[in-house]
Image (spheres, coloured by chain):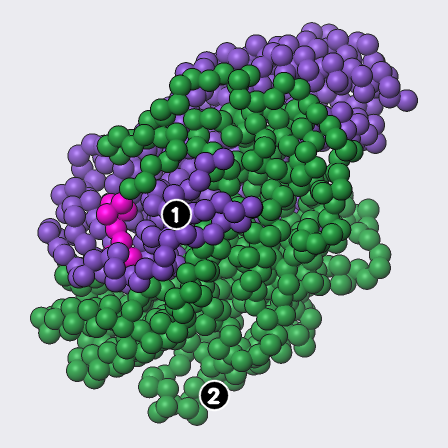
Chain colours: A green, B purple
Amino acid sequence: MHKIPGFGFIGSQYVSKTAAQPVSEFEYDAPSMKTPVPGPKSKLSPPPHSLFISQNVGAVNFFCNYEESRGNYLVDADGNRMLDLYTQISSVPIGVSFPSLFSQTAFVNRPALGILPPENFPEKLIESLLSVAPAGMTRVQTMACGSCSNENAFKAMFIWYKIKERGASGPSAEEMSSCMINQGPGCPDLSILSFMGGFHGRTMGCLATTHSKVIHKLDIPSFDWPIAPFPKLQYPLEQFVRENAQEEARCLEEVEDLIVKWRQKGKPVAGIIVEPIQAEGGDNHASHDFFIKLRNIARKHGCAFHVDEVQTGGGTTGKFWAHEHWGTGDPADIVSFSKKMLTGGYYFKDELQPDKGYRIFNTWMGDPSKNVFLSEVLNVIRRENLLEEVTRSGKALLQGLYELQAQYPHLLSRARGLGTFCAIDARDDVTRDNLILKTRDKGVLLGGCGEMSIRFRPSLVFKEYHAHQFLNIFNDVLAEYK
Amino acid sequence: MHKIPGFGFIGSQYVSKTAAQPVSEFEYDAPSMKTPVPGPKSKLSPPPHSLFISQNVGAVNFFCNYEESRGNYLVDADGNRMLDLYTQISSVPIGVSFPSLFSQTAFVNRPALGILPPENFPEKLIESLLSVAPAGMTRVQTMACGSCSNENAFKAMFIWYKIKERGASGPSAEEMSSCMINQGPGCPDLSILSFMGGFHGRTMGCLATTHSKVIHKLDIPSFDWPIAPFPKLQYPLEQFVRENAQEEARCLEEVEDLIVKWRQKGKPVAGIIVEPIQAEGGDNHASHDFFIKLRNIARKHGCAFHVDEVQTGGGTTGKFWAHEHWGTGDPADIVSFSKKMLTGGYYFKDELQPDKGYRIFNTWMGDPSKNVFLSEVLNVIRRENLLEEVTRSGKALLQGLYELQAQYPHLLSRARGLGTFCAIDARDDVTRDNLILKTRDKGVLLGGCGEMSIRFRPSLVFKEYHAHQFLNIFNDVLAEYK
């Protein structure tokens, strides 16, 4: 247990050791201006700041040096020192770098990233999120969590769709006045197509695309948006090649029908959202071919294609993004992430960039301290070849699950997975819940998903020997199970 | 600049100094179980864990000791060591307490707070958020940001409204099946009443209650929810006592009319949301009497009363919550917060607690590292009597603004404020924007709000002498202004 500078660690309580120090002793005396604002170092033109176009920069005022900022004074990248009466849109409680908060500024001083980013933020993005950008995407927008990421990705698709529709002309006076009272044409009847069994979060936009469990949705108002069937594959896959191909074709046909139907209803589909593997909904897989064809349908009908990698991203399938398994250099228009990425956000193609600043915006827009951690996580993944390890331990895990389902066919079926992102079905929901609890009492934590599935979600340091540890314990549980 | 243990600070780049260490060297060999799970220390019954009912506990599996947890092994409060194949709903990238991430576990190990909270989390809540709970509220739900806080507060109000309507009976089969496809009766046509000029966030539920600027709302689908006028007070207040009272009465009458009208439309109002001072919308104030009467109207019609203190909370008005100025011991049913509180979330009354776990839920549900900071922020606020300081410096600021508007009546009007939460109007939007930029070039940061207002949002360490510093500089800008 390391100590945080400035904090003593007494029992489980942090107690400040720093003597009371009035603000006048650690901050500056007065403003001190060296250049007009934004000064040359705050300009977006030279690199690496020019690469910052990967974010929405329309609202950026200037870049900040949070390490030199103190108390009521914000220092910008050019060394201008300003008395701050706006304080990150009113979100700083006791001034910048208060002495008794330890002074690792990325952790203590949370900026309003959309308007006053730290001066090293473009570099931090390049060494963290942009270093693992999906194929065809050079832009990323950070957000605080997975739901906010999907909500804002939806907004980016709606904005893109309407800009495309308007062409060169701006919004009409009627659009501008009607949107203020939630009415069309300013708030248009656009929709997002999602899949039955999908899970994309629980805020009200996301929730309208989530269809995995009643408890998520009951009593919450929603939107009349189209919902397509997701393929229900039969296992083992090699025995049902023809049936599964037919099932996928049926679902894709339904997607096209729904797009046409909703256009006719006056609620055109601006985007399609899909998980590469439906996770919360039961670890439902589809073929790589299914996803490529789905993307093509989106393109054909002028819909954006949004791949939600909140649960599948970050290496757990043996590739950094699950969509890499599809083998295409153009997987999607938007890819959202969170969870293992430590920060939420979404990558997007140039054309999904809104035409103005402040259209995709909030106070924090993520948390740069999470990018510091992510940089180190990516270092470790590369240094220790963790994706290869995941592939290896995932094979051991899946092979073991195949053996267990052969041995206990009355209890288990449909073992499936990619990397360590594996699942197996129990005979029913009660058996599934019991197996999870009995395995936990022997020291292994598992999760459930869908109606009767067990999902495996180890982190990237899960090795082959951990897989065997689990399989031995699970075998004991199954052997004892009545 | 302190260094983080385990990180060297080279230029602006963090580089890990810890030698590569395989996971097998720092984690445990095998599971080790001492009690069934949850064990006695993970039970919710004895205090302080019993106080944890202040959160939604329906989904909590057990309490965790993250400091003893390593790599693939999660240790619970009873010392049970489990191989973790679920990893905070798949959100841990490289195991727990990876050595080259410095080991202040509250920062490194972000738990899925809703299911696997740290064992000291109830204590942390008590010493941070619960120590400043609004009158009449003993429960709090943390969230990642202000929008998520309001979205989930809306959901809590919808759930509360429907439970009240159903009485003893559970949801019908039709409700359970229809909600999965976004249709009624499972996804009911309930609404939230909001005010023109209000701002409550930008995710799709929140955005339907936000009505301050076109750029927030254009092109985003919305809900047909009622929008009431917010009082437009005339200044100086003492000259327009009768007119302002009439204006407030008119708005309250409209609120009641809208509630009745939307009930007749089949879209009953489940809750009313309001800011104690409309901030983004232009620092629009109303009397304390207005808010008490509004709360009474909500009660009369069976609507929950939600006070959004995201911008006004945390001490900036001279009281910890702006609603304390109303002088009632029962200000609201829900109070949401974010920004200065460092974490998002909302306080709520017992009856707003959902009937089941997992109804209000997401992976992270906040970030306990922010509570560590908040505890220290609250220590500082108390130790240094910062609320008194805010009252004192706010008076100096407002008095100075009165003098400036008297001196420059062609440029400024309507100075107003509570604590340092002050604003003043410029003659038009162009003048407002110019004044902000000219003041910035002399070293003071200000924000705009509404159509032509300047808003002042210093942090709590803003002293009287800072107010005078600003007033002198602003006076220079105004004197030079053509």
Residue B200: image x %, image y %?
A: 58, 38
1 or 2: mark nearer the eye: 1
Up/down of B463 relative to A421, above or below: above
Q: Which residue is mark 1?
A: B6
Disc 2 crowd, CA 10 A, few/some/many (<14, 14-19, 20+): some
Magenta span has A95?
no
Res. B70 visible in picture: yes
Q: Which residue is mark 2?
A: A246
Disc 1 from disc 2: Cα separation: 55 Å
Question: B290 left or right of A316?
Answer: right
Q: Chain of mark 2?
A: A
Magenta span has B72?
yes
Q: Residue at x 11, y 74 (%)?
A: A479
**Mark number displayed over residue A370:** none
Residue A20: image x %, image y %?
A: 42, 17
Residue B8: image x %, image y %?
A: 45, 46
Proximity of marks 1 and 2: CB atoms separated by less than 8 Å: no
Q: Residue at x 58, y 60 (%)?
A: A130
Secondary structure category for the residue under label 1 = loop
Q: Residue at x 16, y 46 (%)?
A: B78
Up/down of A2 relative to B82, above or below: above
Q: Main secondary structure of the magenta part?
A: loop
Q: How many numbered badges does the structure rendering display? A: 2
Instruction: Work out whether residue A138 or residue A50 is closer to the camera in this orientation and state it.
Output: A50
Q: Give, as a single range, the part of the protein colored magenta.
A: B65-73
Q: Amino acid at mark 1?
A: Gly
Residue B108: image x %, image y %?
A: 38, 47
Res. B414 visible in picture: no
Secondary structure category for the residue under label 2 = helix
Disc 1 crowd, CA 10 A, few/some/many (<14, 14-19, 20+): some
Instruction: Work out whether residue A422 or residue A128 is closer to the camera in this orientation and state it.
Output: A128
